[in-house]
Amino acid sequence: MCDYYLDYVKALADPIKEVAVTFIEKCSSAAYIGFEPIQKVRMAKAEAKARLILAETDIEVSELQQRAIVRLGREECKKQENIESIIKKAVPLLGETAKPEAIDEDWIFDVLEKCRYFSDDYVQSYWGRILAGEANHTGTFSRHCVFALSVMEKKDLELFEKLCSCRLDGISSPLIYSVEDSFYNDLGITMDSMTFFASLGLVEYLGAVTFGFSFFETKPCFELGYFDKIFQLMKIDGSPFNHISQGVVRFTPTGEKLALLCRKININGFLEELCRYYNANMHHASIKNR
């Protein structure tokens, strides 16, 4: 293992050290991670190699070609730096029971091939989570999920995070009742954005038709948590409706997996928006503290 990771692994708790070493070695089989993590050294090596190539050939090389060689060296160094940063972000997320040795070789190669283009810290955190998540629970994240992540920019991930946060505890999909509603529009949840996520295979979007489920046939009310609050929904006496609308957007299996990587943020006014909708549609909704 290169010095870049050695000191970092030494600082980990004993049960995790062995898992971390195995994880890093697994990544090493797909991408060489032995460069020194010092940018100046990286640049010097790239330029030195370019000069060596030029010195060892008898072919005259133009200044344009020389600059191209140096540029390629610098680009590869940047990609390598991104890969190493992402791997380092993944290590603290490994569990004691993780089995990085079981990760499919093609899968990890695909991830490292795609993630090397991302230098933004926020985006890298998602790649670190998907690597660690696959090590913790092998087979969780498909190649389709990896592809979807690879074509999402920072703003897309931030919006997907907001979409994931429009969920109550125990409900897998977001509660979005209209993509024309100003509350959701202010979050960035619009017809265009949902169409984009649908094109990636992350959501099903039905437009005016709503998804739903039958619940009141078994009990007259239910309570679901949202951070420090409880959302309570009751059936109005005499109402013939046993169906609860769940909105116009539903996660696909791929979307549900990608949602596992998202932080859940407390959306201000979300529960109040749910109350407004349900109270206008033959239910009684209220909010209380946990």
Image: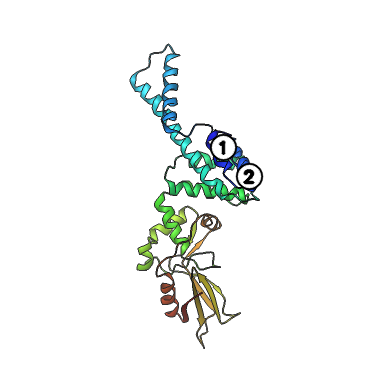
Q: In the figure, 192 relative to 271: above or below?
A: above
State the residue lying farthest toward the top.
58
Q: State which quadrant residue 6 falls in.
A: top right
Q: Residue 213 location, x and y as percent? A: 55, 72
Q: Residue at x 46, y 36 (%)?
A: 79
Crowding at dot 2, Cα within 10 Å, few <14 / some 14-19 / many 20+, comes out as many
Q: Residue 50 location, x and y as percent? A: 42, 21
Residue type at the position of mark 2: Val
User: Which corner quadrant holds the N terminus?
Assistant: top right
**Circle 2 is placed at which residue position?**
19
Q: Residue 256 location, x and y as percent? A: 54, 58
Q: In the figure, 164 relative to 35: above or below?
A: below
Residue type at the position of mark 1: Leu
Q: Nearer the viewer, residue 30 or 59?
A: 30
Crowding at dot 1, Cα within 10 Å, few <14 / some 14-19 / many 20+, comes out as few
Q: Nearer the viewer, mark 2 or mark 1?
A: 1
**Circle 1 is placed at which residue position?**
6
Q: Residue 73 location, x and y as percent? A: 43, 28
Q: State which quadrant residue 61 falls in.
A: top left
Q: Nearer the viewer, residue 178 or 290?
A: 290
Does the image show residue 2?
A: yes
